[in-house]
Amino acid sequence: MAILELKNIYKTYSPDKEYKGEILDNINLTIEEGEFVAIVGFSGSGKTTLVNLINGLLKPTEGEVLFKGEKVEDTSHERGVIFQNYSLLPWLSVFSNIEMAAKEAFPKESKEEVATKVKNFVEMVGLTHAINKFPKELSGGMRQRVSVARALVMDPEMIIMDEPLGALDALTRGNLQDEILRIWETNKRTALLITNDVDEAVYMADRIIPLKPGPNATLGPEFKVNIERPRDKTTLNDNDEYKKTRNEIIAYLMDLGEEQAATTSDVVYELPDIQPRDYRW
């Protein structure tokens, strides 16, 4: 059963309809319930714009986004978002940042019930010892774990991750990849990961779909990841299926990059005729 559908999505920030596909052009995507899908692409290709269309922060210029068959008109706690920049409120503690999301998702529950939910998810991401600390007192990895807990405490039916691990060091990134996978495998929520890391996509996802470079960015062919779960990161480099899938995706992205370079190498930019002012009196 499809939980998310993107149908003929065009997005532009220009009022001129002639350039209707300036950012995203003819995006079509279907994600089944319980799937883990990754979208990989170049910087500036429109990945965050795509995320904001899915979570309801933006509206498409043309086309429609459907969640469980209903048109997405606004944000919803059914779609939990883990942002790249954490987006924590600096004046609230770990507990309060997560509690705020829980109250929004479960307005009829008592204060005690909400507190229990918050503590359970804080424990799940290993931050019980820091539950009363403020964001400035946390490392980058700890802040991102708060962001993960905040998204999950709302019990979303779909988790949307916008390059959530891109700014972290390799060790913290690897640990959080495993943490997210563990939570996903426990709850079997639908997951969409936006990333520019092919290795991360192959390790975590069921399907990988490249986003071609913009302007007029659109989705490329999908690559299925036929590697059994749970996946062992320490043995992946010896896995023939992993190497095959990874190399195919990298080769495809490299070809896209070369095509993009070829189309822009002949572009001639006309500079304005600017002359220095004469300040002599």
Image (spheres, rainbow, N blue to C red):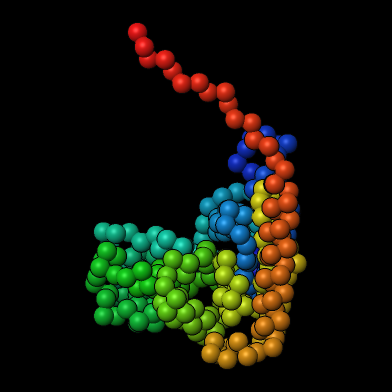
- Residue 266, image x, y percentages: 72, 43
- Residue 156, image x, y percentages: 51, 70
On the rendered image, what quadrant is the N terminus found in? bottom right
Residue 23 appears anywhere in the view? yes
Residue 1 appears anywhere in the view? no
Q: Residue at x 66, y 87 (%)?
A: 227
- Residue 113, image x, y percentages: 34, 76
Q: Is residue 223 left or right of residue 154?
A: right
Does residue 200 lie above or below 63 as drawn? below
Q: Residue at x 62, y 78 (%)?
A: 202
Front residue of this view, candidates 37 and 62:
37
Residue extending farthest front: 280
Q: Residue at x 68, y 37 (%)?
A: 268
On the rendered image, what quadrant is the C terminus found in? top left
Q: Residue at x 46, y 21 (%)?
A: 276
Does residue 14 lie above or below 95 as drawn? above
- Residue 32, image x, y percentages: 68, 73
Q: Is residue 33 left or right of residue 147?
A: right
Front residue of this view, candidates 256 and 116:
256
Does residue 189 lie above or below 195 as drawn? below
